[in-house]
Amino acid sequence: MSKTSLDELPAEGGRGNGPLLDVDNLHVEFATRAGVVRAVNGVSYSLNPGETVAVLGESGSGKSVTAQAIMGILDVPPARIPQGEVRFHGTDLLKLSEEARTQVRGQRIAMIFQDALSALNPVFTVGWQISEMFRVHRGMSKRDGMKKAVELMDKVRIPAAKQRVNDYPHQFSGGMRQRIMIAMAIALDPEVLIADEPTTALDVTVQAQIMELLAELQRESNMGMILITHDLGVVADVADKIAVMYAGRIVENASVHDIYKAPAHPYTKGLLESIPRVDLKGHELYAIKGLPPNLLDMPTGCAFHPRCPYRQDDCVTDAPPLYEIGGTRNSACHYWREVLDGDQG
Amino acid sequence: MATKGERILEVRDLVKHFPLTQGIVMKRQIGAIKAVDGVSFDLDRGETLGIVGESGCGKSTLAKVLMALERPTSGSVMINGKDIAKARGAELKRMRRNIQMVMQDPYTSLNPRMTVGDIIGEPYDIHTEVAPKGDRARKVQELLEVVGLNPDHINRYPHQFSGGQRQRIGIARGLALQPEVIVCDEPVSALDVSIQAQVINLLERLQNEFNLAYIFIAHDLSVVRHISDRVAVMYLGKVVEIGNDVDIYDKPAHPYAQALLSAVPVPDPEGREQRERIILQGDPPSPANPPSGCRFRTRCWKAQEICATEEPLLQIRPGTTHESACHFAETHDVVHVN
Ligand SMILES: Nc1ncnc2c1ncn2[C@@H]1O[C@H](COP(=O)(O)OP(=O)(O)OP(=O)(O)O)[C@@H](O)[C@H]1O
Ligand SMILES: Nc1ncnc2c1ncn2[C@@H]1O[C@H](COP(=O)(O)OP(=O)(O)O)[C@@H](O)[C@H]1O
Ligand code: SF4
Ligand code: SF4
Ligand SMILES: [Mg+2]
Ligand SMILES: [Mg+2]
């Protein structure tokens, strides 16, 4: 396997062929004492400039591990990527040298994390941490870097940025810390922003502020955004496309409008039906029965079969491929037609 | 069993201030965090009161005072006509049987070194009269069955269960003493969507079966609407609006309630560009130093001079159907306007 060099990547703003970012059949496994954990088992989704792709799935479904693989921040070992490609402007990032990846990471693909407090360094001021991006990657002086930091804090609407640039992370509220992390992530004008549950720990009022800010930054710079979340409301509000994950796999890829109108996988359908609705008050909520599988002891065939109301005999033996079901839609279900038609299994 | 509709809980002018101190050896009180600052409401048997509001607004403190885990600074919590806030000793113990709690975090609220049987049966150590020694295992197994767990798993440890199952263990424990009121503080927030629905259905089933009254604290407003008969909206230690679910969700009258509801993402992408969103600026002020007059005025787009000088009381306002604490209360359906 020859190492591709960074030269093959088009310069910033340049266009390669195909999507901006293309995750193709990605696999990630971890060596643990209890055995090999296959955390990601074939994930594919793509992202275009200016687009928002929501990655939806429950805890442990592999959303964050996929993001870490795209960023190149997995610990290898115990992690291993036995299969798959992550193409950025058509170049497979997984084949780049570590130096070349460092050029991409943070500069062209940036990430914000769920827990801002632990992602920020408690012993440095926020201004120092934001300006570090400019000192390290742009060779700026301390003074110019700090100026930039104030500009960015203004941009993410931290009140009185000039006065607060020398404060430490713990002196800010949860919402403001999240803004500071966003400031660091957008500092170098990335083309792709990966936001891993950026608002899960926040109140709905603060969540609304942050989501509005992200949308505005995205409109300004046309960056593509991968939004990892388990909130079906947030997805409906901001996503263009959705990738639904279950037990390390993509089970459905679709546009936001298609999926909410008519899901093509029983898991997606179950999730949407379990949302409390006003007209169903006083009735039992629909609940997907059972539990998500243990990755060390995966069900045979389709991983969803023990919980699936559409299950047939072949589901227990044959794992469904990610079927193309028209346009850019995919479903990993043998019986996607029945699900789409709404015939209860 | 008592009939539905009878008053079980009466909360009046409840206040809980935490002293703010300075100095390590010689502590001086320099102020107070007004976590709960004059809260009143009633709850009937078989009824659910939802409580919503931003983090830090006093929901969990209110829950702890209701449970008599914290003593209020002033005010009363009458359970069946007796004030648990003033009860002591044997009487407090007896009253506590009647009000139990289910906590937010199924991962940390259960002692990892105790078996499920010991966790659920622990309340019987204190209230031996409910389950004599020889009867305990059978009672615990009954409870496991009631919450949909396998009674044979009585000797397992919490780590052997999933989050949703652990929350069921917490619920079984809350039911052990056959209380009439259960305070649920974010009981499903830590759970995945597919598991949340299972736990909510369980809570509703148990309510019907045992005519339980619930105080249901949660930040997911659609879950609160689903389960609640009435809803109270809190801001900085006070209830700013209270009413039945239709009043609050379809006819909110207080600007904060309107902002809160409009911030909730709607799980339907159709018409999302047209949806009204009131984005509040900034964070809530510190409860150690709340604004004069109306506490919401520093973030309110309707504030006038009177809002800084005169505190708006929680009452039914002209043109509205339920109580709100705003001088300029005005019904506005933020969720459904296009
Ligand atoms: N370093 C590691 N070693 C072993 N297993 C791991 C490691 N990191 C993650 N995993 C496992 O991989 C699976 C996927 O984890 P991941 O963090 O991607 O989940 P997620 O979808 O982001 O969930 P959440 O919504 O809880 O953040 C989980 O079962 C997790 O326990
Ligand atoms: N034991 C305590 N000592 C001092 N302040 C406290 C204590 N418990 C809670 N508070 C403060 O009281 C306010 C309300 O807290 P809480 O009731 O936990 O809010 P909520 O549950 O609505 O998020 C917060 O400002 C919180 O920091
Ligand atoms: S393949 Fe079979 S078990 Fe899997 S989701 Fe489809 S119908 Fe259900
Ligand atoms: S009383 Fe005044 S400040 Fe308070 S909510 Fe009403 S209009 Fe706003
Ligand atoms: Mg994650
Ligand atoms: Mg709380």
Image (cartoon, rainbow, N blue to C red):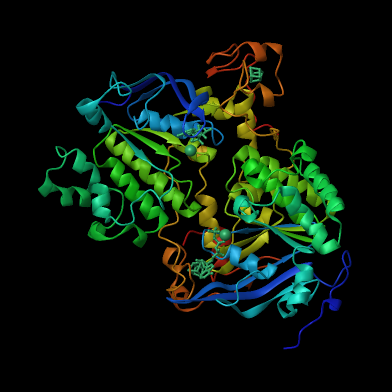
Q: Position of residue A239 (x, y in %)?
A: 69, 53
Q: Is residue B185 above or below residue A65?
A: above
Above-or-below relation of B300 to A46? above
Q: Relative to residue B34, is residue B295 drawn left or right? A: right
User: Vertical placement of B118 versus B264: above or below?
Assistant: below
Q: Residue at x 61, y 40 (%)?
A: A204
Q: Residue at coordinates 31% horizontally, 49% vertically from top-left?
A: B147
- Does residue B140 appear in the picture of this structure? yes
Figure label count = 0
Residue A90 lies, in percent from the top left, at 79, 75
Q: Quadrant of the N terminus of chain B?
A: top left
Residue A281 in the image, given as x and y percentages of width and height: 47, 37
In the rendered image, which quarter is residue B262 located in? top right
Between A93 and A41, the residue placed more toward the observer is A93
Q: Going 68% across and 53% down the picture, which residue do you hit? A: A257
At a point 23% along the width and 31% down the height, the residue shown is: B93
Residue closer to the observer: B76 or B216:
B76
Apparent side of residue A324 relative to residue A284 in the rendered image (left or right):
right
Q: Splitting the image into four quadrants, where does ligand 4 fall?
A: top right
- The relative height of residue A289 versus residue B26 in the rendered view (above or below) is below
Looking at the image, which residue sits at the far front?
Answer: B25
Q: Nearer the viewer, residue A171 or A51?
A: A171
Answer yes or no: is residue B335 visible.
no
Q: Residue A300: percent from the left, percent from the top?
A: 44, 76
* Nearer to me, A187 or B77: A187
